């Protein structure tokens, strides 16, 4: 009878297995001979003392956290579930790093798409203490604590956040299929650092793009600037395996055409009446029309400079003074 260890997927042993398949000659008594590995990789080994790298205090431990096994398990909560026997969805509650370790066996290389919205490093976000001794109790205690402050005055403002996010992204990548993709929400506090981490974990060549999300249309005043947007980073696990769909060509129809191409005619108006002559006088100005000059197709030409006999044309607006409420005013 086979004895079950009850441990999760062993990332280190899997890495060794892959290395043996590629470079069996670098193993000596089942250990990796680093010098032989350098020879096998030839000129692609960095030997300079000064080199391009992204590092911080605790990075080595963060990498080890991603490789660590656990004996934890998931327990079903049928009494809290809906349509337990027929549902195709799964909701897991627990510390996300511990859960990511547990699901490595079942979902490794099987997930098509991941979207995460990690804690933003605003100085008030919960910074995880990745200690899983008696992990259920630990998790519940952290829930009760709600948010732990991570002020800039603490001295490791970025370091704490980087140590939290690195192992989670490392394990998330393991879950993705070869053609899988990941989307990560973030604001500008850690955007630059997150980009560097993802370049390291997913590979710079697998970076697809950054979405700018208009999350706060009315803007939040942070001093010096009103912030309206956040970001979503978009990475592939293996960009050569992803499917690229071209945007469909628009079937745009134009009613009119001239030597510059097709065009349509739209009314001249101010689409936002909040901006008017009362509060934005520099944005309220006329065009000029020569009533005696028409193009061959019967349209009047519009100018930006006024000349004798030209007519001023204003967009119709409704402002406090109600000075201009028609499209054309005589000069």
Image: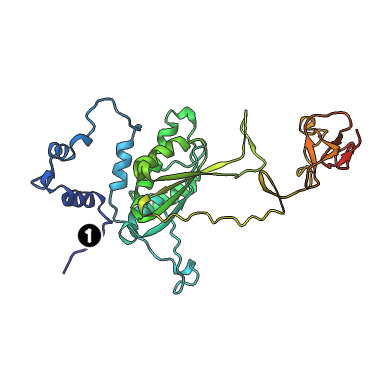
Closest to the observer, 157 or 53: 53
Q: Residue at x 50, y 35 (%)?
A: 189
Quadrant the C terminus occupies: top right
Q: Residue furthest bottom?
A: 85
Q: Quadrant of residue 102?
A: bottom left
Residue 161 seen from this side? no
- Vertical placement of residue 82 versus 133, above or below: below
Quadrant the N terminus occupies: bottom left
Read off the residue under disc 1: 5
Q: Residue at x 33, y 52 (%)?
A: 174
Q: State left or right for residue 141 relative to residue 297.
A: left
Closest to the observer, 105 or 98: 105
- Vertical placement of residue 282 versus 207, above or below: above
Residue 62: x %, y % from top left: 33, 40
Q: State left or right for residue 242 relative to residue 124.
A: left
Q: Quadrant of residue 276?
A: top right
């Amino acid at each position: 009878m086979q004895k079950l260890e009850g441990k999760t997927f062993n990332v280190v042993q899997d890495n060794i297995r892959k290395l043996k398949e590629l470079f069996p000659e670098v193993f000596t008594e089942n250990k990796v001979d680093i010098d032989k590995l350098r020879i096998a990789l030839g000129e692609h080994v960095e030997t300079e003392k000064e080199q391009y790298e992204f590092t911080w205090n605790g990075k080595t431990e963060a990498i080890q956290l991603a490789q660590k096994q656990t004996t934890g398990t998931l327990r079903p909560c049928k009494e809290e579930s809906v349509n337990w026997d027929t549902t195709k969805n799964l909701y897991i509650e627990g510390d996300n790093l511990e859960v990511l370790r547990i699901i490595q066996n079942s979902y490794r290389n099987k997930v098509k798409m991941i979207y995460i919205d990690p804690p933003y490093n605003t100085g008030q976000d919960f910074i995880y203490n990745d200690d899983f001794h008696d992990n259920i109790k630990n998790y519940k205690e952290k829930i009760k604590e709600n948010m732990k402050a991570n002020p800039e005055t603490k001295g490791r403002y970025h370091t704490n956040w980087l140590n939290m996010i690195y192992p989670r992204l490392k394990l998330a990548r393991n879950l993705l299929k070869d053609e899988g993709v990941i989307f990560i929400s973030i604001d500008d506090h850690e955007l630059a650092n997150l980009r560097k981490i993802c370049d390291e974990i997913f590979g710079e060549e697998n970076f697809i793009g950054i979405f700018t999300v208009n999350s706060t249309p009315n803007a939040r005043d942070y001093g010096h600037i009103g912030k309206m947007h956040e970001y979503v980073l978009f990475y592939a696990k293996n960009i050569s395996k992803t499917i690229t769909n071209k945007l469909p060509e628009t079937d745009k129809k134009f009613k009119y055409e001239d030597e510059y191409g097709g065009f349509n005619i739209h009314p001249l108006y101010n689409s936002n009446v909040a901006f008017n002559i009362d509060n934005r006088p520099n944005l309220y100005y006329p065009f000029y029309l020569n009533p005696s000059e028409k193009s061959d197709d019967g349209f009047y030409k519009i100018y930006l400079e006024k000349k004798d006999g030209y007519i001023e044309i204003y967009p119709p607006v409704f402002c406090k003074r109600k000075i201009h409420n028609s499209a054309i005013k005589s000069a």
